[in-house]
Image (tube, rainbow, N blue to C red):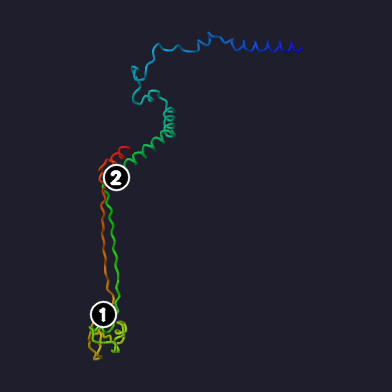
Amino acid sequence: MSFRKYRLGATASLLALGACASVDKAQLDAQIPDPPAQWAAAEDVADPPTGDWVASLRDPQLYSLIAEALTHNNTLLAAAANLQAARATAKIERADLLPTLNASGNASRNAIVTDPSLQAQTGGGGGSSSPLAGLRAQELEDRFGIDSNGDGKIDGLDLDGNGSRDADLPNRRVYINNFALGAQLNWEIDLWGRLTDETRAA
């Protein structure tokens, strides 16, 4: 019984091998074109396509497919981005060969408030024993100020009380305007050619 099974299995295997080897060689050779006697590169062709050779095909759909392929070609987009980055890097490296100028400007206005005592207003002479020595300018105006020209503004001091202006009012606010302009020029001399080499490498 087992010998019969073995014989049937061997027969099936031989039939399978025979089926694989029963390919029609004549039909297979008819489907393969004959190779040319000599291969030629594209530049050796008598009339290679030039210009807009796609137009000769007169296929608008082919134009749209080509445009879509170019628009969504990630390889071309990456190459264009790499080229743009390389150009920017080259500009940065080339800029190191040129001098740099840094300029700055500043403007400010400060007010200095002075409130001299009576001694400063009268030019000295009123020592600490004077009753007016401790008074400040605003207090002097409040007590002894006069309006000599009648414009409603206090413009003088009546120190002796006779109604006449003995001293001008102090200028208690002085404005100081400050203007500053600075510039700094830097230029690295390419003595050993380092900057030039970096520019060429970029």
Q: What residue type is labelled 2?
A: Asp
Q: Is residue 142 above or below residue 3?
A: below
Q: Nearer the viewer, residue 197 or 99?
A: 197
Mark 1 falls on what kind of element? Answer: loop
Q: What residue type is labelled 1?
A: Pro
Question: Looking at the figure, which quarter contains the N terminus?
Answer: top right
Q: Name the residue under label 2.
A: 96
Q: Residue at x 30, y 75 (%)?
A: 113
Q: Name the residue under label 1.
A: 170
The image quarter containing residue 57 is: top left
**x and y, in percent, of residue 144 in the image:** 28, 87
Looking at marks 2 and 1 on the same chain, the residue that comes earlier in the sequence is marked by 2
Distance from Cα at disc 2 to Cα at disc 1: 58 Å
The image quarter containing residue 91 is: top left
Q: Is residue 174 above or below residue 183?
A: below
Q: Which of 36 and 48 is in front in this view?
A: 36
Q: Is residue 110 above or below residue 36?
A: below
**x and y, in percent, of residue 24 in the image:** 56, 9
Which one is closest to the eye, mark 2 or mark 1? 2
User: Of all residues shown, which one is farthest toward the right?
Assistant: 1
Q: In this view, does 74 lie above or below 159?
A: above
Q: Nearer the viewer, residue 109 or 101?
A: 101
Mark 2 Cα shell of 10 Å, populated few (<14), some (14-19), many (≥20): some
The answer to whether marks 2 and 1 mark residues whose Cβ atoms lie closer than 8 Å is no
**x and y, in percent, of residue 186 in the image:** 26, 50
**x and y, in percent, of residue 29 in the image:** 50, 10
The image quarter containing residue 131 is: bottom left
